[in-house]
Amino acid sequence: MFTSVLDMLQSIRLGSGMLRSDCCSVHREHSMRMTLNRANRGGCFVALVVTLVLVLEAVLDLHGQEASVQPRSAREEVIDLAARGEYAAADHILAEELRNDPANFALLYNRALVNFFWKRDEESLRLLRSVAAGDREDPNYQALLSSVLTGLDRYREALPASREALRLAPSDAENWLRLGALYLHLKMGGHATEVYEKGQTLFPERPELLLGLGVIQEMRAKFEATIPTYEEVVRKFPRYLGGYLFLAGAYLKASRTAEAARAATQALALDSRSALAECFLAEAAWKTPGQEKEATARIQKALQLDPTLPEALVLAAKIELKRDDPQQAVYYLKKATAEQPRMASAFYVLGQTYRRLSQTRDAEAALREFKRLQRSESLGNPLVASLLAARQ
C-alpha cells in the first residue's frame, strides 16, 4: 500500500512551486523527481530567484557585509542565468566570487543552491559543509541541507536539519511541509500526523497540509477516511490542482472509476496540460469495460504531454500487455524504472512481463528489486517526495 500511494505522489509538485499558479505558468508535475527527486527540486525558478535575491541582499546585510561584496551587475547576472536554467554559467560566476572571499556565507549558500537545482547534490553538500559553523544558524541553510540530503536518499541525516529549519523559522509553512514529508519518508506516520495537524492550525490557507493528512490515511489503506479528506481539500480549495489529482487517484484505488474520471476532468479544467490528469482518465477508461480505445488515446495524450511520466508509462505497459504485446510493454517499463528507480510497482509489472516472455533471469532480477524496495526502511517514494516542500 505504501508504494501505490507514493508512486502517485512523485508526479505532483506540492509545496513551493509546481502547483501554485502564482509561481509560473508552465507546470511540470514531476519535475522534482528528487529522485526530491532528484527530489523536490522546485521546478519553478521563481523560488530560486527569490531566494537568491534574499540571500544576496538581506543575508549580506544580516552578516554586516556591504552590498559591494558582489557587484549588482554580477548579482543580476547570476539571477538571470539561474532563472533560465543556465546553472553552469551561474555556478562559474559564484565560484569566481568565492575566490576573493572563500568564507562568504551568501556566496557559498547560493552556489550550493544553484548546484542543487543543477542536480549536483554531492557538490551542493560539499559547499554546505564548508559553511562556517557560526553561519549555519540560518533557516534557509538548514532547509537546503535537508533537501540536499533527501536528494541523496539520506533521509535520517536530513531529519535534524529539517527540524532545525522549523525551529529557526516556525512561521514558514514550507518548513512544516518539509518535515512532515520527511517523516513520511521514514515511515513515521505518527510524527507526520502531528506535524500536519499543527501546521494546518497555523496555516489554514495551505491545502498541502490537509492533503498530507489524506496521504497518511491512504498509506494506511484507510480509504474510508482518505477520500473524504481529499474531497474536503477540493471543497475548501477549488482552484488547487493537487486536490483533484489526489482525489482521482484515491477514487481509482477504490474502484470508483466514474468519480475518478470526474475528478481528473476537473483537474484538466484547471490545467489542460496536466499529464497526470490525462493518465488518470486513461486508467478510469481502462478499468471500464468497452473503453479500451479511449484508454489508449488518453494514455498516448498523457505521454505526449510528458514522455517521462512513470505512472503513464506503467499504464501504457499494462495496456500493451492486454493487447498481447509484452515486448512493447517492456519498452515502457524500462523507461519508467529508469525515470523513477524507486517505483516498486513498475518493477513488479516488469517482472511479470519478463515471465510472459520466458526471460526467467530478467524476471527474477526485477522481482528481487521489487521486494527490496518493499522492504526498504525509507519509503524512498515519488509521491511522498513531492510533499517535501523545500525552501528552494
Image (tube, rainbow, N blue to C red):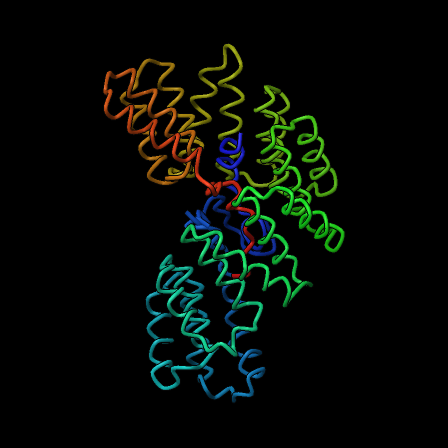
Residue drawn at x 48%, y 51% as measured from the top left: 155
Residue 207 vertical placement versus 366 (above, below): below
Residue 317 vertical placement versus 200 (above, below): above
Residue drawn at x 33%, y 24% as measured from the top left: 351
Seen from the viewer's position, the closer of residues 282 and 362 is 362
Q: Is residue 277 left or right of residue 301?
A: right
Residue drawn at x 47%, y 88% as measured from the top left: 68
From the top left corner, tell me how far across and down residue 369 is, in percent.
35, 32
Q: Is residue 366 left or right of residue 361?
A: right
From the top left corner, tell me how far across and down residue 56 is, in percent.
51, 77
Q: Residue 94 is drawn in which quadrant? A: bottom left
Residue drawn at x 42%, y 50% as measured from the top left: 153
Q: Residue 346 is drawn in which quadrant? A: top left
From the top left corner, tell me how far across and down residue 359 is, in percent.
23, 20
Q: Is residue 321 left or right of residue 357?
A: right
From the top left corner, tell me how far across and down residue 71 is, in percent.
44, 85
The count of marks equals 0
* Residue at the top extreme, as displayed: 290
Q: Is residue 207 left or right of residue 332?
A: right
